[in-house]
Structure formats: structure tokens, C-alpha cells
Amino acid sequence: MILVLADWLDCSAMNSTRPHSQSGITLQFRGVTKTFYDRARSVEALQPFTTDVAAGEFVCLLGPSGCGKSTLLNIVAGLELPTAGQVLAGGKPITAPGSERALLFQEAALFPWLDVQANVEFGLRQQRRSAQERADMARSLLAMVHLTGFEHSAVHQLSGGMRQRVALARALAIDPAVILMDEPFGALDAITRDRMHAELEAIWSATGKTILFVTHNVREALALGDRILTFSPRPGRVVQEVRVTLPRPRSLESHALVDMAAQILSVMRTAEANAAALPA
Amino acid sequence: MPADSQKHSPPVERSPAGSRTTWLRRAGFYLLLLLSWELLARSGLWPPWLFPGPSLVVESLISMLNKGLLLKAVAVSGQRILIGYAISLMIGVPLGLAIGRVRWIHETLGSLVVGLQALPSVCWLPLAILWMGLSERAIIFVVVMGALFSITLGVESGVKNTPPLYLKAARTLGARGLALYTQVILPAALPAVLAGLKQGWAFAWRSLMAGELLFFSLSLGNLLQTGRDLNDASQVMAVMLVIILIGVSIDQMIFAPAERQVRIRWGLYTRETD
Ligand SMILES: Nc1ncnc2c1ncn2[C@@H]1O[C@H](COP(=O)(O)OP(=O)(O)OP(=O)(O)O)[C@@H](O)[C@H]1O
Ligand SMILES: [Mg+2]
């Protein structure tokens, strides 16, 4: 009960500094393909991928290691160009990074030369906000990810999970319309992860941002997503698309969720077996 | 994965009690050194004007101080190195950034800098004197030639080794153009940049002393030379001592703390061990 109350307080703290938070935009994937070329060989990471993500939709990407999930997020972030096809964000083709799309990297990618608060302020500094405004926003975002008291810690003094939460605060600071998350909670213990799920869901339902969420964890995907796209082993292609209509907030332990998880896992196993059967 | 490598801090280096015994040992060593030097000087093997003991050196030091020579010489040399070093910084940092980030500059200027780095900077002195005479400009030119390439190469190596992840993160957070350089590339490169600045400083100091040997106006290097002209080995040794002291103090007062600060911030060692 106390925990729930705390969550509510933290979130309202954020909303008070952000009265007009940016809500989500659509993402349209049109035959997005990625092949990496080396001197000697080429690696086909992603086979033509087409889907429409509605504004404010929460989409989870599931798939085995190396199937191109990070590559896909990098393309949406504008850090890499697809070999073929294109992605439209809010109807406009993506060609470069933009502050309406924030990427949370698989590694937290915090800047070691800045303390925690300065890391969170980084994007705001680029927008030339005043020092006061930056500090206020950073503090309320850090409170939201339960890191009050660590404002002036050095990055190396944080645990892996704490770094991921700082990275989340840093991404939220620029108030993006799309949040791209690459296994953000992989390093967290079960309790903290549940709490972060609740936070993320609260932010998402309060702001209506579009979220692309990569995970290895089937149940995590089911707990958070409106829709789950399951990828085959490399070269990645969608082998299953599941709409999750379970009421929120969802419990990771509920029977319905566990049953769906078993079904998705069996599809993943079949895809894995098929890939192994193919000649390399 | 830079974020992960920070987790592994090296083993604790030394306890505070250990550093006290270090100091004791060090003090004992120097005491013994001075004592044997004095004894050797008084043994009568060499005349005192060729091999003076520490007592004569200190005497000479005090007399130079009293005549106001020493402070003036330090001021003259100090000004030269400050100007020369500042110029090297102003050229070397942007040059290093450009060579580290722009391919065609790396392929052209980059190779030239590596070549010039191999040339001891005193070798520029004859040319500098031909071009500019025995002037202030000539000596500062030599100082710049000493520091510039170390600084450039330090910045370049730091910039080249900037983890691409930091650049990607910064770009997705809206950093563009100059902000990428000042807020990401340079700070990320700071450990290597500092190493370059430190080496540049050491080279600048060496070049200055070598250059000043040839000049007639009062300076530290010139005091060395007049000591030789007067057959006064104790003056020469006294000035050498001052040169060592200045070099070490700059290192201890500026570069060592800066490096420690960076290492703490980067998590290369923890606060307890310094
Ligand atoms: N820059 C690159 N050059 C060459 N190959 C690459 C590059 N980046 C990724 N790849 C390859 O593309 C494939 C997909 O990589 P990606 O990082 O997208 O996988 P992932 O699905 O995120 O895996 P994980 O779950 O392990 O993070 C991999 O086989 C990888 O080897
Ligand atoms: Mg990945």
C-alpha cells in the first residue's frame, strides 16, 4: 500500500513539472531491411519488416540474441540507415536522430565525466534550458526512478540497474514522443523490476507516448505490451504477432499471462529449431 | 562495453600506513645521498670548483637569490614557457581534434605530425635563429615545437578512442555540431588528452632549457651557461636543482591532481586508495 502511494506521489511530481507532455506519434515500418557489409562477408541482420505502430501504442519486440532487435531500434533512432525500406515517424521519413525519439541503449551509455544529475540534464542542456529549470526537472525525474540522493554520485558508483534507471530519466527529460527501450530492465531484481514496470506503465498511460520495448523475457513483454512481435533467429523476421488484451495492471504471475507465455515460447522454440535445421 | 569495464576497479594500491613508510624510506635515501655527495666532494679527489658538495651548492643558491638573479631568471623562463605552452594548446587541441575526427586531415596532416614528433625540438633552434635571430620569438618557437606535437597526438588518440556509444547517446539526446565536440568528444578523451598535455609540458620545459643555453639575456638556461663561463660548478648545480624543482612542482601541483581527479571521476580507482 505504501509502495503504491509512493509511486503515485512520484508520478504526480513529474506531471507537475511537465504540464504539457508530448504524446505519442505513429511509426510506420515499410519493408525495413538491414544487411551489414564487411570487407569479407555480409551479415543479414533484418529481413523486410513491415508494421504500423499506432500513436501511443506499447509494442514489445521479442527474439533470440542476434536477431536484429537492437539494429531495428537504432534505425528508428536514426543512428543507422536501413539497407532497404524506410521508417516514418509521425508520417515523416527518419533520416537522422531527433529529439522526438529517445533511445535507451542496451548498455546504459551514461557519460562517466558527468555526475548523475548532469547526465539527466544533458538533453535539456542541448535545448538551452535554464540551469534552474534543468535542475528541477532532473531532480523530479530522479525521484521518479527512485534515485533521490544519488544526484551527485559518479556513474561508476551506481549498480547496473541504477544506471539503467538514470538512463531512463535522461531519456524522459527530453520529453520524446517515442521511447525506444533496449532491454532496459534486464539487470534489475524482480522487485525493482516490478516497480519500474509500474512506473513505466504510469508514465505511458499518463502521457500516451509510443513505446518500442525490446526484451528477452516473454512474461515482461506480456506484462507491458499492447502487442508483441516475436522474431526468428538471425536474419530476423516476424514469426508471430500477438495482441495482448489482458486488463492492466497485469500480474506477471496471473494464469492467463503464464499460459500466453508458454504459447509464445513454443513458437520461439519452433523458429529456433527451423533456423538450426537450415544450412548456414 | 565501456559502461561495464568501469565496474572492475583495480586492487587497492597502498594503505595510508604504507605510504608513511614510503616517505620515511624516501627521506632516508635522500639524506644518505646528500651525505655521500658531501663526503665525496670533501675527499679532495676533485677541486671544489669542479665538484662542489651540497653545502657549496646551497651557498651559491642563496647568493643568487640574494642578488635577485634567480627570481628574475625564473620569471623570464616562466613567462617564455607559459606563452609557448599556451600557443601550443591553442594550436594543438583543435589540430588534434581535426586529425582525430576528419579522415582526410588524418591522412595528410596526421602523418606529418607523427614525423615531426620524432624530431627533438632543439633541432629547430638553428633554423629559428636564422629566421628570427636570437630573439624572444625564436625561443618561444622552439618551445612550441617541443609541446605542440605531444599535445596534438594526445588529443588525437583520445578522440580516436572515444567510445562510439557515447557519441550515439549524445546524438539521440540532441547534441549537434560544436556541442558534440565540447560536451562529449573532448571530455570523453580527457584521460588521453591529459597524458598528452603532461608530456607536452615536459618537452616544452626541456626545449626551453636547451634553447636558453644559447641566449645572452638572463634566464635559467643562461644562468647555467654563465656558471660554466665562470668555472663555477656550484652555480651550475644550483640552477640544475632549481630546474628540477620547478619541473617536479608543476607536475605535482597541476598534472598529478588533474589526473587523479579524472581517474576518480571515471572510476579508475576509488577514493579510498588515494
Ligand atoms: N555494426 C555491425 N557490423 C556488422 N554486423 C553487425 C553490426 N551490428 C550488428 N551486427 C549483426 O547484426 C545482427 C543483429 O544484431 P543486433 O545487435 O541487432 O541483435 P539483437 O537482436 O539486439 O541481439 P541481443 O538480444 O543479443 O542484443 C547480429 O548478428 C550482429 O552480429
Ligand atoms: Mg541487442
Image (cartoon, helix red, strand yellow):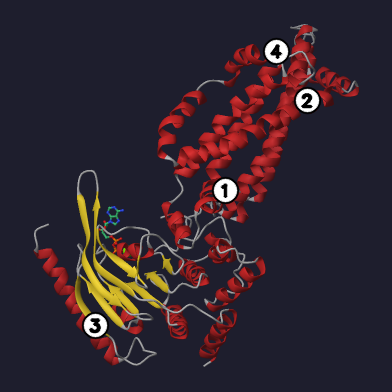
State the image coordinates of residue A124 (x, y, percent, origin top left). 56, 66
- Residue A157 lies, with reference to residue B136, above or below; the image says below
Give coordinates of residue B199: x percent, y percent. 58, 33
Which amino acid is tagged 1? Answer: Glu
For ligand 1, tell me if the residue under mark 4 lies within 8 Å.
Answer: no
Q: Which residue is the site of mark 2? A: B76
Residue type, label 4: Leu
Are discs 4 and 3 less than 8 Å apart at CB? no
Q: Quadrant of residue A225?
A: bottom left
Mark 3 vs mark 1: in front: 3
Chain at tag 2 = B
Whether discs 4 and 1 lie on one chain: the answer is yes
For label 2, the crowd category at 10 Å Cα-Cα, with few meaning under 14, some 14 to 19 and many 20 or more, is some
Toward which corner of the image does residue A193 lie, by quadrant?
A: bottom left
Picture disc at residue A242:
3
**Are callouts 4 and 3 both on one chain?**
no
- Give the label on residue B214, or none: 4
Q: Give the image quarter of residue B82.
A: top right
Residue that appears at 51% across and 79% down: A21
Foreground of the two, B76 or B105: B105
Q: Residue at x 54, y 61 (%)?
A: A155
Task: Measure the alpha-carbon separation of dots 2 and 3.
Answer: 78 Å
Measured in 3D between alpha carbons, the distance from the residue under mark 2 to the one under mark 4, in whole angstroms, is 15 Å
CA separation in Å, label 4 and label 3: 83 Å
- Viewer-nearest of discs 4 and 1: 4
Determine whether label 2 and label 4 are within 8 Å by CB.
no
* Residue A144 rendering spot, x and y as whole percentages: 54, 78
The quarter of the rendering in which ligand 2 is drawn is: bottom left
Helix, strand, or loop for circle 2? helix
